[in-house]
Image (cartoon, rainbow, N blue to C red):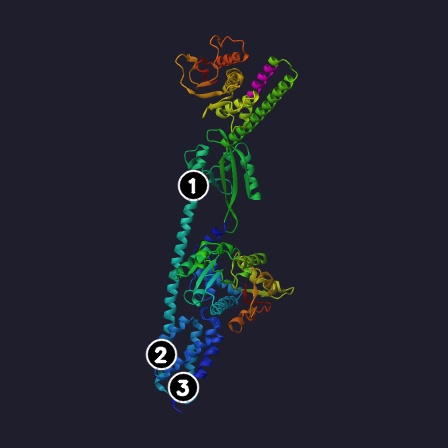
């Protein structure tokens, strides 16, 4: 049998020997080499090596080394493979009588190049992987730096005052909001001072004492500005912990709640005032009801009418208090809505329907304070009542118009009338008109007396036009 | 401390990083001296760890190969570590969609660098105990779309999670995944005997030191935790059997009380 034939015969044995070796060293390889591939690998290696023995080409050793490196073989494994290939030639083939001197002479060089090829690839791979790692690390660090920058900006520009201190409570950093709240010009004025110095009394010391035990503190506190003035804050103090969860400092976050507390106080007062207006309205409604009940016992029409008028007057005031407590704040009465409700009540009281007498109200955008709204409401009550009672006798049809608008300060107004807003109130109807011979200022009518008295009380003036009905114009200043 | 911050601090080559230690133990080059030193500490106490990690990765490759042969073309992997050689995208045919995830933002940054030229491969930060963060993300919607028949990898992480966390993750993934989806996972199984937990004590101590407690459980316990997923053939097997090697972890550890087993589950 020729040497080549013997070598071919031995190839299967070599393959099994290599496979056994690869199995033994399977855990020495890189994980990329899956154990299921060992058979394929040993077969290919045996074939390649036998090919080399058939036709020796030393340079092919480097290719084999490169190939085995890319397959994921470990250094220990490839050293053992090289040794096993040499032994195959020197011992096993020799024992089988194969003496191919040229190939045997080349085997040392072949395995040397195989190892060199392997190491070259490994070296290149290590450099490539390390470069990849370095780039990834740079990316991660850049991303981390950007993140830190944003966090730094967030703390720096926070509207909350933020202070950092060491575990003894010595201030190490404050943000601009903190300086602003306390009235300091620069961080240099506060750095190194104690956390306790910024608070009224001994609260700061107590917080510092409690912090290691509690880990944090949250509550309202009185703070003292640089100029000694006190202000209210909501304070959150927490321990800053490192990666090992050990405290390394203190962070205080402060919100100035002075305005918030004022607003809360105002809100409380507002609620209280609304409650009072509600009760006044209820009381006035009780009075109105009592007047109604009392009127039921009166047989005389005129007297009964007087009760009704009084009842309406009381109701006009009750309505004002109702509007007031229903408003968002107590700043004033929205006139348009008030006048509409007031006049609608009067229409109901006198049994007049909209289809009989048109009611037009124009007082958009006018808000009156309580002191002005009460006399103004009573004036409207009297004048509309007057129109309903007298302007349209025998169920005649027509229109009653109420207008309230802003007005210029009249030239004849005295210097004492400077400053306040002026208004024009018009109550008009197109009924039979006010009698020509009747001076409304001197009439015995209680209603018109009330109108004149209240106009005077408002420092206003009143005029009457009698063309095609009656048109009262009252110019007054907000009380 | 926010999770992000906790891990962002390891963007520091002066401190050992779990992802890089893992890479070294697998024979990789994506590690620094500090990681190699830390890895030597791990090996000193647990000489079987490099074998263990290799077995896990080989099992992963084995499972991916099987699933690809069955026609799965979409993979979502939790606790991926570095997507270096023989990870899912290297084993699966070109064009397979793969989404890796890891809790460690630095590992993810490395991972993105490694896969940056692979159009169907992505890497996101996501803790394995909160899979919903990844599954409900825009990234998954974009890459996977409405076809939720996926293969999910959950390897080398179960022993870092409490029973409750594993059960929750399994349930979340199950509810999200489409019918016919598969999940391949491996875990350390300890024998249910009174002294068994004591046997893994050294290992647990080392991980405790690294700030990562270890939770060892029996295979039976894990089987109940992965429900409603159901095991398919060949069922729960030691990883050595999955990949066809001898002389695995149990021999090396000389504990004889635990085994690393793997399973492929289906919905």
Would residue A353 appear left or right of B106 to someone viewing this image? Answer: right
Q: Residue A268's image quarter?
A: top right
Both marks 2 and 3 on one chain: yes
Picture layout, residue A372 above or below residue B143: above
Structural distance between the alpha carbons of marks 3 and 1 = 80 Å
Q: Chain for mark 3?
A: A
Numbered disc in front, either 2 or 1? 1
Numbered disc in front, either 2 or 3? 3
Point out the residue furthest to the right here: A297
Would residue A139 appear left or right of B245 to someone viewing this image? Answer: left
Estimate the x, y position of residue B79 in percent, counting from the top left: 49, 60
Q: Main secondary structure of the magenta part?
A: helix
Q: Residue A177's image quarter?
A: top left
Would residue A22 appear left or right of A57 to someone viewing this image? Answer: right
Which numbered circle lies on residue A7?
A: 3
Estimate the x, y position of residue A190 in percent, counting from the top left: 45, 36
Q: Which residue is mark 2?
A: A109
In the foreground, A136 or A118:
A136
Do callouts 2 and 1 mark residues in contact (Cβ within 8 Å)? no
Mark 3, Cα crowd under 10 Å, few <14 / some 14-19 / many 20+, is: many
Mark 1, Cα crowd under 10 Å, few <14 / some 14-19 / many 20+, is: some
Do callouts 3 and 1 mark residues in contact (Cβ within 8 Å)? no
Give the secondary structure at mark 3.
Answer: helix
Q: Which residue is mark 1?
A: A156
Instruction: Please check the rendered image and state whether residue A313 is part of the magenta-colored stretch, yes or no.
Output: yes
Estimate the x, y position of residue A256 in percent, counting from the top left: 49, 34
Which numbered circle lies on residue A217?
A: none
Residues shaded magenta: A304-316
Both marks 3 and 1 on one chain: yes
Question: Could you tell me if residue A23 is visible in this image?
Answer: yes
Picture layout, residue A137 above or below residue A49: above
In the foreground, A371 or B85:
A371
């Amino acid at each position: 049998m020729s040497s080549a034939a013997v070598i071919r015969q031995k190839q299967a044995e070599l393959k099994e020997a290599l496979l056994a070796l690869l199995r033994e060293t399977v855990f020495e390889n890189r994980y990329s080499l899956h154990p299921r591939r060992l058979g394929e690998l040993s077969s290919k290696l045996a074939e390649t090596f036998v090919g080399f023995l058939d036709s020796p080409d030393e340079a092919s050793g480097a290719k084999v080394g490169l190939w085995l490196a890319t397959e994921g073989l470990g250094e220990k494994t490839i050293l053992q493979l090289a040794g096993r290939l040499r032994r195959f030639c020197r011992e096993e083939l020799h024992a089988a009588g194969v003496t191919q001197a040229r190939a045997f002479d080349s085997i040392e060089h072949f395995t040397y190049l195989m190892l060199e090829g392997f190491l070259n690839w490994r070296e290149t791979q290590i450099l490539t992987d390390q470069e990849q790692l370095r780039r990834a690390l740079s990316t991660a660090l850049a991303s981390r730096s950007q993140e830190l920058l944003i966090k730094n900006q967030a703390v720096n520009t926070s509207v909350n005052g933020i202070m950092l201190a060491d575990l003894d409570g010595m201030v190490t950093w404050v943000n601009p909001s903190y300086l602003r709240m306390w009235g300091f010009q620069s961080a240099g004025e506060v750095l190194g001072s104690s956390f306790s110095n910024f608070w009224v009394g001994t609260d700061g010391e107590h917080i510092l004492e409690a912090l290691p035990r509690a880990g944090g503190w949250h509550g309202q506190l009185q703070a003292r500005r640089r100029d000694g003035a006190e202000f209210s804050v909501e304070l959150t103090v927490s321990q800053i912990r490192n990666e090992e969860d050990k405290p390394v400092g203190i962070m205080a976050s402060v919100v100035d709640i002075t305005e918030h507390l004022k607003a809360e106080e105002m809100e409380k007062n507002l609620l209280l005032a609304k409650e009072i207006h509600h009760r006044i309205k209820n009381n006035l409604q009780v009075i109105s009801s009592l007047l109604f009940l009392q009127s039921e016992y009166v047989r005389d029409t005129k007297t009964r009418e007087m009760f009704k008028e009084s009842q309406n007057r009381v109701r006009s005031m009750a309505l004002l208090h109702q509007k007031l407590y229903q408003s968002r704040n107590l700043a004033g009465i929205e006139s348009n809505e008030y006048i509409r409700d007031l006049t609608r009540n009067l229409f109901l009281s006198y049994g007049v329907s909209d289809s009989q007498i048109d009611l037009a109200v124009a007082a958009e955008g006018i808000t009156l304070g309580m002191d002005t709204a009460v006399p103004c409401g009573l004036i409207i009550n009297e004048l509309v009542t007057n129109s309903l009672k007298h302007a349209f006798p025998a169920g005649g049809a027509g229109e009653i118009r109420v207008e309230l608008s802003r007005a210029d300060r009249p030239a004849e107004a005295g210097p004492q009338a400077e400053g306040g807003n002026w208004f024009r109130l018009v109550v008009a109807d197109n009924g039979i008109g006010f009698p020509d011979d009747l001076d409304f200022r001197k009439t015995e009518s209680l209603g018109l007396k009330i109108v004149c008295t209240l106009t005077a009380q408002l420092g206003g003036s009143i005029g009457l036009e009698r063309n095609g009905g009656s048109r009262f114009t009252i110019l007054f200043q907000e009380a | 401390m926010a999770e992000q911050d906790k891990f962002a601090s390891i963007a520091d080559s002066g401190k050992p990083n779990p992802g890089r230690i893992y890479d070294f133990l697998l024979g990789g080059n994506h590690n620094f001296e500090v990681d190699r030193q830390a890895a030597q500490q791990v090996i000193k106490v647990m000489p079987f760890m490099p074998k263990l990690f290799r077995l896990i990765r080989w099992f992963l490759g084995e499972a991916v190969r099987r699933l690809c042969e069955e026609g799965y073309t979409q993979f979502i992997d939790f606790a991926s570590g570095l997507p270096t050689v023989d990870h899912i995208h290297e084993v699966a045919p070109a064009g397979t969609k793969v989404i890796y995830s890891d809790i460690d933002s630095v590992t993810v940054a490395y991972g993105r660098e490694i896969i940056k030229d692979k159009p169907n491969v992505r890497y996101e930060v996501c803790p394995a105990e909160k899979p919903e963060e990844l599954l409900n993300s825009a990234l998954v919607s974009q890459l996977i779309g409405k076809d939720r028949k996926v293969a999910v990898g959950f390897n080398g992480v179960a022993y870092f999670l409490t029973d409750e966390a594993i059960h929750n993750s399994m349930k979340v993934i199950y509810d999200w995944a489409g019918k016919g989806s598969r999940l391949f996972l491996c875990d350390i199984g300890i024998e249910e005997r009174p002294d068994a937990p004591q046997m893994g004590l050294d290992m647990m101590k080392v991980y405790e030191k690294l700030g990562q407690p270890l939770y060892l459980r029996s295979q039976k316990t894990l089987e109940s935790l992965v429900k409603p997923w159901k095991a398919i053939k060949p069922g729960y097997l030691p990883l050595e059997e999955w990949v066809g090697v001898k002389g695995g972890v149990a021999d090396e550890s000389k504990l004889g009380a635990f085994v690393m087993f793997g399973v492929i589950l289906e919905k």
